[in-house]
Structures are given as C-alpha cells and as structure tokens.
Amino acid sequence: MNPTSSSLDGRALSALVPASRQRPGNDPIFALNAEARQRSEAGESILNATLGVLLEDDGRLAIMPSVAEAFRNVPPERAAAYAPISGDAPFLAAVIEDAVGAGLAEKAVAVATAGATGAVHHAMVNFLEPGQSALLPGYYWGPYAVIAQHARRSVRTFRMFGDDLRFDLGAFEAGLHESIAEQGRATVMFNFPCNNPTGYALDDREWSAVADMVREAGRRAPIAFLLDHAYAKFEPEGAPDWLRHVPTMLESATVLVAWTASKAYAQYGARVGAIVALHRDPDERRSLANALNYSCRATWSNCNHLGILAVTELLTDPGYRRRTEEERTVLKGLLDDRVAVFNAQARRAGLPYPRYESGFFVTVVTPDGEGTAAAMRDDGVFVVPMRQGVRVALCATPAHAVPRIVESLARGVAAAGGTPSG
Ligand SMILES: Cc1ncc(COP(=O)(O)O)c(C=O)c1O
C-alpha cells in the first residue's frame, strides 16, 4: 500500500494527491497582514505596508465613484445572463484599444480573464509545455510561481539589476538563450511600469534593447513575450511608450498583454481582465483566439458579466472616460506624494533601491530580506520579505508615515548586514 495515503499510522485517510497535501496554508502576504492587524487590535502602533491595494491616508480603500455608478447602472437582466466564453465583443474591442491602441488593434485578439491573474494562467498553459519554465526577472510577483507550479510549469529567473541597480539587459539576453537551448522556446513575463515588487519602469533605451533581443530570439525559436500591464495607468509622468517597440517584437514573436480593471479602476474584487494576443499572421491570430477561448472554457467558463458590462461602459462612454480619468488623477496624486516623500527620505538615509518614479511598491535591497523584515516588525513596521530585498507597499502607507518606514528600513537593512549610510 502507498504509505502517503495510508491510515495505518492512525492519521485520517487523505484523498488529496501528494502534491496537494503539501500546499502552504495561506498566502504569506495575507498571513503577515493578519499578524499586523492582531498587534494593532492589541493596542500597538503598527504600520502595515504589506498589502497591494491603494488606501486613502485614513486607511480606507480608495475607490472611484464613477466606477461604482457604472456597476449600479448595468441592467440586472443583462448582468444575470452568462457572458460569452471569450467575453462580449464590445468589451474585447474596447480592451484591445485601451491595451495596444488603434494602430495595433488589427493585429490583436483577446479573451476575458479573471483579472491579470487569469491572463497569466492562460499564458502559462498555452505557451509552455508541462515541465517548461517561464522567464522572469529575479524580483517578481510571487503568484507567477504559484500559477506555474499549479499548472505543472515553473519559473526561471535572470538577474534583474546590475550593480548600478539598472535593468540587466545582458542577463535577460542570456536567460533567453538558456530557455531556448533547454526547451526550444521561451515565454517571457515582464511587469512594467511600476514593477511589483520593485517599482521599476523600463526607460526607452531599455525597451528598445529588449525588443531587439526578443526579435532576434524569435528568429531562432518560438517566443511569447507577455507584458503584465496591471499598473499601466499608474505609469510615471513622461514614461516611454512601450507600444513603439511592439512592431519590432512582432517581426518574429507573439506579444501578449495582461490587462486588468483591478488597479486601473480600483476595482480589485470585480475580477475583470483580459489577455490580448498580437501576431503578424491572421491564421495564427485565429489559433491564438481559439486556444485562449478553450482555456476560458476549461477554467471559469465565463467571467463576471456584471463587471464586463460595467467596464465596457467605463471604457467607451465619453462621460465615464472623462470622469474615471479625473478620479484616477486624484488617486495617482495620492500615490505620487508618497513616492516623492519616500525618494527624498530614502536617498538621505542612503538606502539602496532601484529607480522608482511611481507605483504601488518599492523594493529596498538587503542581503537578508527575512532578517530585515523581522527587525522592522520589532519596530511595528510590516513589509514583505524577499530573498534579497523587502517590498514596501506605499499604496497602503500615508505620506506622513513614510519617514517612520524609512527609519525602520535603515535599521532593518543595517541589522541584516546591508550598509545604509544614513
Ligand atoms: C504584477 C501583478 N500582476 C497581476 C496582479 C493581479 O491582478 P488581478 O487582480 O488583475 O488579477 C497583481 C496584483 O497584485 C500584480 O501585482
């Protein structure tokens, strides 16, 4: 008898397959958040910079009134009906235009997904064989690895930053070569601007080099390049237009965009997203649309119809468009103030961190992320530890609390053997 499913040792017989019996109980970020809340309820002064949603300075979730109105105005009998498996055509057209603009729309197909998370899932299962790995920068949003593992794929990383804390283009190119050599294909997953967890945004020179590398790799093997654009609407002032470089990649590769309403409309719970797929060849576009539609059927069948219909209005109605832009500008201003305070204080304290111009998070580099985060918890400051850094969620931190975080970061980095000079 297989001992892993035996009850001979007195334990209850588990019907879970072995891999499922090993799953960790809770997402580590949610676990940290629970500890922060407990200590706060016990009366301690706690600063919780772990969660990835935009909060007002008073700790309430930041929302956009026009979005709530659009949801309320969807006729109930339309919302109650099933959405088409790929999503309603007007939604897909509006998302494609929002994601890649009118100029590239004719080269794109899309399906609705459960947020950008669903888009990442569809990319994992359609552009990698079981056992193969997606290529990511070394600092990445943890669930990529969970999604990959659950789908019997994995992730491999390349060194994200050189010693100057700028994007390491050479390491990316080497990673592409290695993926192609080992598995005959490469599927790249980038998340810019406002990279989670570092806050980094590629500049125009970096985008141009990345596009050239993708094009060259695509001449030797099948390449899918996914841009997780979850934070697209929070890009820094004067950010480069990555779409300028898409035609270069499309000469040989498939380009994918993970689109989501979660951050753009501060509507995380609606689970409205899409994967947009671009290819130069119309037959291939048909195959892409079919493959992605099949994955929808095989997972959630159809997405949240209320959300799809409301977001379609938000994207297409001129009145809603104007109001959402205005409301988003206010939210972005809230975040930008925090970023400005952080940059001023963190530079003064000599904290090591990559270029950070906007975004929900920033990562401070430290030799021991766990040690730094533990030392900070002693100060009542909660951040998310990573192997070589700690992630600070400025999206959840009022500007007046940023100096306390920076002081604690400086102590935490020093405690872990890093060298802040302040
Ligand atoms: C980089 C990144 N991608 C995807 C997501 C998931 O977003 P969604 O709510 O659209 O699934 C997040 C959410 O935190 C994220 O930070």
Image: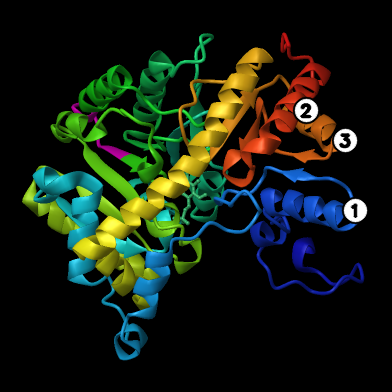
Q: Residue at x 84, y 45 (%)?
A: 45
The percent coordinates of residue 59 (x first, y second) are 66, 54
Asked if residue 280 is positioned above or below residue 25 in the image, the reply reads above
**Residue that carries the numbered disc 1 in the rendered image:** 43
Q: Earlier in the sequence, mark 2 or mark 1?
A: 1
Magenta segment range? Answer: 218-225
In the rendered image, residue 220 lying in the magenta stretch gets the answer: yes
- Nearest the camera: 319 or 33? 319
Q: Looking at the image, what colour scheme do you see?
A: rainbow
Q: Which mark is residue 408?
A: 2
Q: CA distance from mark 2 to mark 1?
A: 20 Å
Q: Which mark is residue 22?
A: none
Whether ligand 1 has any atom under 8 Å from the Cβ at mark 3 is answered as no
The earlier-in-sequence mark between 2 and 3 is 3
State the separation of the CA atoms marked 1 and 3: 15 Å
Residue wearing tag 3: 378
Three-letter amino acid code at disc 1?
A: Gly
Q: Nearer the viewer, residue 387 or 383?
A: 383
Q: Amino acid at mark 3?
A: Asp
